[in-house]
Image: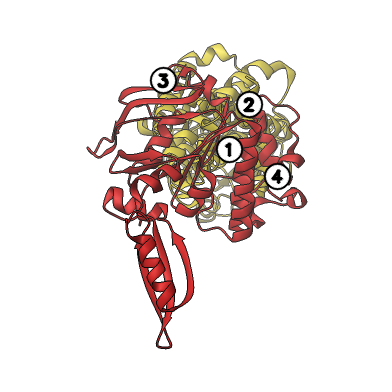
Chain colours: A yellow, B red
Amino acid sequence: MNRMLSIVKKDIKQMFSNRFIAAITFLAIFAYALIYHLMPSTVNETYKMGFYAQKGRTAIEKVMEEESEEGLKVEWASSTKELKKMVENKDVSAGFSVTFSKEGKPNARLYVSSETPKEIKEAGEIFGREFAYSLTGNQLPIDVKEEIIGTDMVGKQVPLRNDMRMMFLVVVFMVEFFALADLLAREIEQNTVFAILVTPVNKFEFLASKTITGVSLALFESLLAAAFLNILTLDILLPLLVLLAMGAFLATSIAFIVGALSKNAVSVIAWGTVFMMVLIIPAMVVLFPGLASPAVKAIPTFQLVTALDGVINNGLALSEFSAEIAYLAFANVVFFAIGFLSFRRRLAV
Amino acid sequence: MEKVINAENISYTYKKGVKAVDNISFHIGKSEVLGFLGPNGAGKSTTLKMLIGFLNSQTGKIDILGKNMAHNTDEIQAEIGVCFEEKNLYEDMSAIENLKFHASLYGIKRPDVNAILKKVDLDKRGKDKVASYSKGMRQRLMVARSLVNKPKILFLDEPTDGLDPVSAKAIRKVIREEKERGASVFLTTHDMLEADKLSDRVAFIDKGKIAAIDTPDNLKHEYGKRTLKIRYQENGQVKEEELSLEAKDIGKRIEEIRSQYKLHDMHTEEATLEDIFIQVTGRGLE
């Protein structure tokens, strides 16, 4: 055990004596924290609705004053054309017009843009009906101009900066696997591994010590990032530790695979980039839910991000994500076995 | 004599079918230096790898310090020191850090690194990063590293290959000191002169087989032809004549030359190890 700890100590010292690795590791964490703290911490939930009434605007304004709808702000348009423009320019979330035919028959119409989420359309319908009723005294058929089935973007209490924290944590793991893969490839390239293996240290101890280095560093760095990103709280500490440890283990496994495939620092960057590009996609899913295709869901970082998002942003229990954790654990075992065995082959004399 | 290494009928054939070592046997005694000589591809490195536990002999057995290598690799590796031919130091660490790390792998907590570095004349550069070292300094540090655990057997793979005279001299000094300390040395080298000076015995390896193994003197005696070279002046010109020391009429011929001509000089000449290697294997070391 002491021999393994000696290797771990040497590795950590060596990793941080590499100024590039040290810089991207810690500067990146500080950069994430800075971005996080500069972004707005609240979500603007005020619903802005455009309105055009051919006649009876005063009646609607009166209703608004009486009802004083919280979270609703009405912008008036002077014509249907102007109302459409306001919707198109996203000045308002939806537009509602009430016009009258020559016979005096009222006609209500709701305008939404192609990017307007379903909830806004529904809210627009409700507000529109209410105002039209107060204006004409009748229930009016609402003609929805365009209906888009989109993802939930409204009423969501999680600010964007909080969603981005999942991405930052995954990036911390990516940086860590680059650092460890570089260290592994250098041991082979510079033949230093053989200077170690000719001592009483055997191959298993050598690989185990590299695993300890990788997992402990990745876990430490992700916890440091979590602290800077306001995630590290006592109430979610245990589930967070479990998930970050699984992420750290995944990063270490990938590092073994990249280290086994690479001959030098250049090939570490080349192979590492390939893996990083695949593993980073699921981290984007929290920001862009439309990315969650079946193929993306098969990438292990998807399970990690989903569980982290649930625990950190939605306050859910770890047990809610037992399927994700089981999948991630299975992926960890498979990747580690591949990485461990393939790197072991590189140690052959 | 106590045998610290005893290799019996060891062989190794690589996966591509190349038979690198073919059923060889030899031993090394305590405090003995065995020079292992042979051209590139002769099987020196493969033999070394089997002796240090990197490869398993496919036939026979290797006993080191009375223990079987195949079953006691870790235990044996704790008692040996190895200096590889390829440079394998941590260049981003200082010499002291390299030695301390290596010592920690043997469980040595406080190695006397300055004393070790002094042995190879690197004590004044101990805090410098290895990346700033010359080739000779790196090689000396590699030799120093192989000494951190006070090994009972030292394996040196081409330790002076391509080195400047100062570094080569420092390494030869270490080999003599280690021998005096009681360590045995397995030395692979191309340098026949070095092997002749340092080795108690030398083994010639060629095409995976040991062609000859004995003390340098015995090999010279057995295979070399000892001659007497005489130079004398005849009609103002220096002439040279080579006489075999084994020739029956050598005394008569010397007397003839001495009485008829002015003797310039005369000296005996013995075969070098390189001459003997060529004679034994039928080819040179290159």
Residue A326 x, y percent position in the rendering: 46, 16
Is there one chain holding both mark 1 and mark 2?
no
In the image: residue A39, left or right of residue B268: right
In the image: residue A127, left or right of residue B204: right
The residues tagged by marks 1 and 4 sit, at their Cα atoms, a distance apart of 40 Å
Mark 2 crowdedness (10 Å alpha carbons): few <14, some 14-19, many ≥20: some
Q: Kindly state the secondary structure of the residue where label 1 is placed.
A: helix
In the image: residue B119, left or right of residue B277: right
Residue A204 x, y percent position in the rendering: 49, 23
Q: Are marks 2 and 4 in contact (CB under 8 Å)?
A: no
Q: Can residue A150 be seen by looking at this rendering?
A: no
Residue B81 x, y percent position in the rendering: 57, 33
The residues tagged by marks 1 and 2 sit, at their Cα atoms, a distance apart of 29 Å
User: Which of these two is toward me, B267 or A196?
Assistant: B267
Q: Nearer the viewer, mark 3 or mark 2?
A: 3
B23 in relation to B159, above or below: above
Q: Earlier in the sequence, mark 4 or mark 3?
A: 3
Query: Residue under mark 2: which chain is it in?
Result: B
Q: Residue at x 56, y 42 (%)?
A: A93
The residues tagged by marks 4 and 3 sit, at their Cα atoms, a distance apart of 33 Å
Q: Are marks 1 and 4 in contact (CB under 8 Å)?
A: no
Q: In this figure, which residue is indicated by the disc labeled 1?
A: A176
Mark 4 crowdedness (10 Å alpha carbons): few <14, some 14-19, many ≥20: many
The residues tagged by marks 3 and 2 sit, at their Cα atoms, a distance apart of 20 Å
User: Which of these two is toward me, A301 or A93?
Assistant: A301
Query: Residue under mark 1: which chain is it in?
Result: A
